[in-house]
Image (tube, coloured by chain):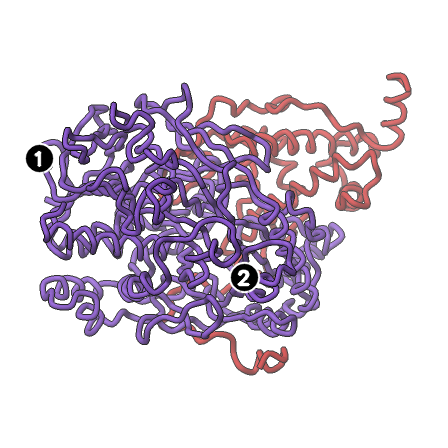
Chain colours: A purple, B red
Amino acid sequence: MPFVSDGTQRSAYDVVVVGSGAAGGQSAYTLCMDGAKVLMLEAGRKYVPETETPMFQTPDSAPLGAVGTPEKPFGFYDATVDGGWQVPGEPYARASEEDVGRFEWWRARMLGGRTNHWGRISLRNGPYDFKPHSRDGLGFDWPIGYKDIAPYYDKVELLIGVYGSNEGLENTPDSSPGCLLPPPKPLVSDLLVAQRAKRLGLPVIPGHRAVLTQPLDFARSPARLHPGNVTAQRILAADMRNRSACVWATPCGRGCAIRANYQSTTVHLPPALASGNLDIRTDAMVYEVTLGRDGRASGVSFVDRITGKQRHVTARVVILAASACESVRILLNSRSAQFPHGLANSSGKVGRYLMDTVGSGLSGQVPLLESLPPLNEDAAGGHQLYVPWWLYREQHAGKLGFARGYHIEFGGGRQMPGHGTGAGTEWLTGGSFGAQFKQDVRRYYGSFIYFDGRGEMIPNEQSFCEIDASLKDKWGIPALRFHWGWSEHERRQAAHMQKTFAAIIEAMGGRTHGAPQTDGARAIAPGGSIIHEVGGAIMGADPRTSVTNQWCQTWDVNNLFVADGAVFASNADKNPTLTIMALAWRAADHILERMRRKEL
Amino acid sequence: MDRRMTIKWVLAAGAAWPLVKAGGARAASPSSARGYGADPDLLKTYRPGELWPLTLTTQQRRLAGILADIIIPADEHSPSASAVGVVEFIDEWVSAPYPAHRRDRTTVVAGFAWLDAEAVRRSGREFADLDATDRHGICAAICDESSAAAELRAAARFFSTYRDLTAGAFYSTRAGRKDLKYIGNVPLARFDGPPPALLKSLGLQ
């Protein structure tokens, strides 16, 4: 019985995994496929993408044209359940409400967590990204290098299905042969961006996203992923056959009923459940890792959200994969005589060095794209092409005024009309209405283009979270308080993004919608708003300055691991999810090995 | 300037922007309505009025339809805004219990009142009773905030909001998608990208 409750849950497990998203899903998958008995605890409700996903619904079927509201911030059809910037009954505090010092915390309370709605952009960190301090003297080096994690990037790509190409560019790693699926065909607007941006010296290459542009290789990949494990190979092959390739329609953010993209609920959990080794308990809000007399984690305590009762489960190993800030919160709330400032916090670094991605965007309108013939441009749901960071040499020579890079995501085309179509067009139409307005909307539809920069933030002392002195959630669990600050590196980087986007739009013969924002402090999106928050329990080589070692194992508690983004020692411009999964797989392999040797 | 002078000045230049509370003079207040929550059923089809009561008066809804059809009239490609449910959509929108929608409610209800006041000031009749030329004349004065007379800026902001709502509602419908020749949202066995001839004509191949 894979979904358990009080009556059906075992009294003890090999491993308890807190969280069911990218980190929890990957941890449970790797452990269960190799025979470990795992209990996964998820704070939110059970969620079944196959039956709950609004695949072809149009905006006129939804309330308010499916626009975002405080209850569904990314729109009515966004997959997120019981989540958003605010979760009812689960408050958090902020030291500042000003844009420059504000941190926004996005959560989802559902099986699979944020993997159900994420953008599916799956970029590898490069060699520089693991040794940033060695390269420019800022931030921290990771205790691992690219070569340590590269085999796990290969594995994750083979398992979940990622399209992309190998271009041999600096700090933009190639995958091993056979790992990537073919990239989708670009749109007209993509090709125009590519042509004009290349004239400015920018590389424009296929994006990497976790979308199946063709069926997975179920004949060969299972043996590559699980050598010598016939059972795991059989289970995975059967599951890969049940995933459909993309049908080139409906936005990925709604989730995917045919399992054509990655979400934990459609990729990690089904084979893990099929192994018979995974129990899942939903509506289980973990608030504490309990410590035994031997100094080892004895298990976790949680609140059953349905009954309100407190429960405890024991395990040989505890893995926190609750999202960077939630895992930090659990550690800080796990106080004991031995750890008065929170579990595994002898360094005082739990909660420190919170990072998000630097985000800034600009849109424009391009006459060359007006009045094109009707084309179906739903494609793979965006990110057919992107621009990786390209100024490594100039930056390293100190010519840019900021130390770390960004990549550019962009999009355009004849997307499904909806709320926003024809809106805010006075700058182009002079305020037309009537027959002229209808003609104007036809003319401009599909001619807009947007650019979003996604840049590296350097960890700093101003950006951290702690337990608030008085604020508690509805179960009485002490809540987090966030502090946030950007440095000049991020502000200058955001201003550079704006100038670059304006230059590309101009090179396309287009007009920017509003002037580019060259004041970096105004150009930058508030902390947390890109939803790439990582750090808070960073890994390192020294127990005095980091929380975990290279295996995501806490220095202080032998059998306690943090498998999510909390362990990131830097936050490269590359979107974090693929790296979270690769680290979680690597940590789980290590746990299995140590359990076999009876060391855990 | 004293109050009498102010009133004179405003009347000379255009109807004053009415100070209307969020509930509107006659419309029922949406303040007690609740939203759809953070875990609504995404598969069902929703109709305006199903989740929270619609609150515009009959007179306001009549005006809503007239104005929506001035912005999006029927033509050889597609029907008018009111013919595809835009009035119901706008009523749902301004009756919704969310902060942004409450702000739009204030703008829209005040805008309707302003339109009638301006119509009376110009022609002695309410907006709905004007002929097409007179209606057009009022809209033309407020259709572009950047070029509108200073005293008409608030009315122009209302018109901009209302045009956005009308367009969003209209182009979200099957008729709107057809008007724009949107042919996606259907499953495809393969995606071949844009035709080579088109790319060649654009100098992209």
Q: Amino acid at mark 1?
A: Ser
Q: Which residue is mark 2?
A: A411
Q: Is residue A234 above or below residue A265?
A: below
- What percent of the width, then of the height, locates residue B84? 54, 49
User: Where residue A406 appears, x then y in whole percent?
Assistant: 54, 58
Q: Vertical placement of A101 versus B174: above or below?
A: above
Q: What chain does badge 1 belong to?
A: A
Number of labelled discs?
2
Q: Name the residue located 34 percent from the left edge and 52 percent from the top edge.
A: A580
Q: Is residue B166 visible?
A: no
**Relative to A569, is A159 on the left or the right?**
left
Kind of residue sitting beneath label 2: Gly
Label 1 and label 2: CA atoms lie apart by 51 Å
Is residue A214 among the parts visible in the rendering? yes
Q: Name the quadrant containing residue A350.
A: top left
Instruction: In this rendered view, identify the residue nearer to me: A169 or A196.
Output: A169
Residue A99, position as x, y percentages in the image: 59, 36
Give whichever of A308, B33 is nearer the camera.
A308
**If you read the primary sequence from the N terminus, does the residue marked by circle 1 or circle 2 appear first?**
1
| Residue A14 in the image: above or below residue B28 | below
Q: Is residue A176 above or below residue A249?
A: below
Quarter of the image for the N terminus of chain B: give it: top right
Identify the residue under disc 1: A11
